[in-house]
Image: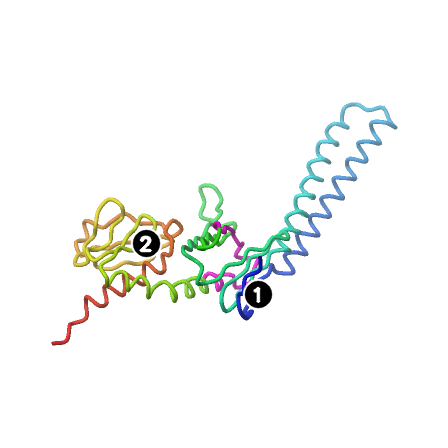
Amino acid sequence: MAIELGQLQREYKVRPNLNRANLIFGCLFLIAGMLLLLYTFYITFFTEPDGIQYLFGTVGFLIALLGWLGLRIQKQETSICVQVFSEGFSYSRSGKTDQVRWDDITEAILGVVQKKLRHHRVILETFYEYRITPQSGTEIQFRLKKNAIPDIEQFSNTIRNEVTRRQLPKAIATFNEGGTIQFGKLSVSGTGINNGKETMAWSDIEELKLNKGSIKFLKKDKSSNWPDVLVGQTPNVFVFLALVNNVLKNRSEPTSG
């Protein structure tokens, strides 16, 4: 069932030149593989085979398989489309479309995954991962390749801003009423921040900051800092950070007489 998402604001699609490259290489590999298979057929039935036909056949099959896989990936990536609207977004791939409104999102987990050469720091590919949980449906999961879709990091920023704009006031209100706000294994309350094992009191907190995909908890007593918590495993981490910063800011401001 279609959801009313408001006015279209931006659309993200795979780079056209990347689609053409996948299409060209896929076709070349498929044609090369098929030619080797045809040559194998010729050797087997029209000459005196000496066993080399098995090598040609195996290589031809593998090359054709790589070409088929390349064309399949090209077709899937061509169909990827993210549309951002004033009231939500949609994600389409291979004929399937997921839609969600900003005010329907209860949890959003945004992560960055990097594929590297083993034992090296060379980054091969970078992906943005999204796990969106709406109130009215099942979790939506997908990942987008950074170098395949222009400015896709702006889509992540949009999710952060829209979800924070709607959930931060509710979180602040719950905090002011003495309630506890849960963010995965982290929770925020009037006593401080709890990581599921212990509580860091507000008076002990020096600062929280992001560092290479993790949240660093710095105490005024530097010798007892908490272990880092991964951003990609923390629901609504941007709301969590905004809430904590709001509490710390209010505590640091002198109260008027």
- Snapshot quadrant of residue 205: bottom left
Identify the image's colour scheme: rainbow, by chain, secondary structure or one colour.
rainbow
Q: Earlier in the sequence, mark 2 or mark 1?
A: 1
- The reply, left or right, for residue 58 in relation to residue 238 is right
Q: Residue furthest right?
A: 46
Q: Is residue 155 magenta?
A: yes
Residues under labels 2 and 1: Cα distance?
Answer: 31 Å
**Which is more toward the observer, 212 or 217?**
217
Q: Is residue 161 above or below residue 59?
A: below
**Residue 128 drawn at (x, y percent):** 48, 54
Q: Nearer the viewer, residue 58 or 107?
A: 107
Amino acid type at circle 2 is Ile
x%, y% of residue 201? Answer: 18, 55
Q: Position of residue 206 (x, y in %)?
A: 21, 59
In this view of the protein, which residue sits in the foreground, 69 or 43?
Answer: 69
Residue drawn at (43%, 65%), measured in percent from left and top? 162
Q: Which residue is mark 1?
A: 11
Residue holding disc 2: 215
Question: Height in image: 168 above or below 36?
Answer: below
Mark 2 secondary-structure assignment: strand
The residue sitting at the bottom extreme is 257
Range of residues picked out in magenta:
138-156
